[in-house]
Image (cartoon, rainbow, N blue to C red):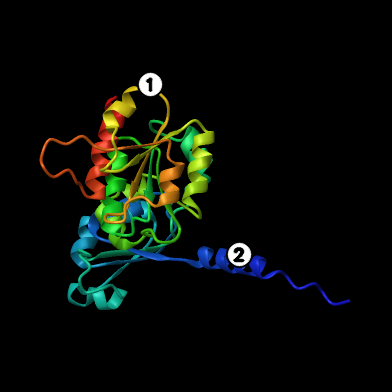
Amino acid sequence: MAAMQKPGWVIDKERARRAAANETIWLFGLHAVRDALINPARQKLRLVLSANAADRLGEAVRAGGIAPEIVDARKFATHVGLDRDSVHQGAALQARPLNWGAMEDVCASGAGAPLVVLLDRVSDPHNVGAVLRSAEVFGARAVIATLRHSAPETGALAKTASGALERQPYLRVTNLAEAMERLKSMGYVLLGLDGAAERTLGAALAGLGGRPVGLVLGAEGPGLRQKTRETCDGLVRIAYRGSFGSLNVSNAAAVALYAATAR
């Protein structure tokens, strides 16, 4: 009797799982590489350094337990295969993406305040890196984004995050609205930032006491998608005094995180 053929969706899921297991990224820049080297959770595959970077990262290299390849600084980008515009500072590490575990575990009982940031299709790695840095500074439990149409874990993101990628959980979910509903079932109040909203962020936070908060931000230009807006518990704006009341997404996240932690 012939074996039953697996459904297409099962085959696709298995293929995606194998691809994820084999995925690697190049982290570059002294800060990003140093913090990845000293992170025991980071699986390190290949370390390439210039002689100068090797001197500066000596202690981190020893802690990382991986022997570096020393490369002429003038040939560095070509040797590693980095874009010529990458500010690598003579340091690059090939590694596996981090696995932070289940969203429920991180957001319900993870380190830090019961505070998370959700990004709706924010695809610029520099913006996401800056948000991760602010999230770490203000003690948020996680930054949550979608698997598609959002910035993946890359060298550019890691460099902008200046080490925060190694310490600040960055969770990628298949469906943002579903993830938001799961957070709401955990007690989170989700506030979507919208410059046209009537209520201010400060006023909304004042009535929440110590309840867990999720700050939801959209990409610059399009803002929050309709489904995301509908899934929020409320839409709020950052109060401003000037005649122009728009901040870029990473600056808005920093201001909102400060407001949420200072309530």
In this view of the protein, can residue 33 be seen by the observer?
A: no
Label 2 element class: helix
Query: Is the residue 134 above or below the residue 73 in the image?
Result: above
**Residues under labels 1 and 2: Cα distance?**
42 Å
x and y, in percent, of residue 57 in the image:
25, 56
Label 1 element class: loop
Callout 2 amino acid: Lys
Asked if disc 1 and disc 2 are in contact, CB closer than 8 Å, the reply is no
Looking at the image, how many numbered discs can be counted on the residues? 2
The outermost residue toward the right is 1
x and y, in percent, of residue 134 in the image:
27, 42
**Residue at image point 19% right, 46% down:** 246
Mark 1 lies on residue: 209
Tell me the quarter of the picture where residue 135 sits.
top left
x and y, in percent, of residue 130 in the image:
26, 49
The outermost residue toward the left is 242
User: What label does residue 175 carry, if any?
Assistant: none
The N terminus, quarter of image: bottom right
In this view of the protein, can residue 66 be seen by the observer?
A: yes
Mark 2 lies on residue: 13
Q: Is residue 24 left or right of residue 164?
A: right
Tell me the quarter of the picture where residue 115 sits.
top left
Q: Nearer the viewer, residue 152 or 52?
A: 152
Callout 1 amino acid: Gly
Tell me the quarter of the picture where residue 127 sits.
bottom left
Query: Is the residue 57 above or below the residue 255 in the image?
Result: below
Q: Nearer the viewer, residue 65 or 120?
A: 120
Q: Please rate how many residues cluster around mark 2, counting C-alpha atoms within 10 Å: few if below 14, some from 14 to 19, many from 20.
A: few
Among the two numbered marks 1 and 2 on one chain, the one whose residue lies closer to the N terminus: 2
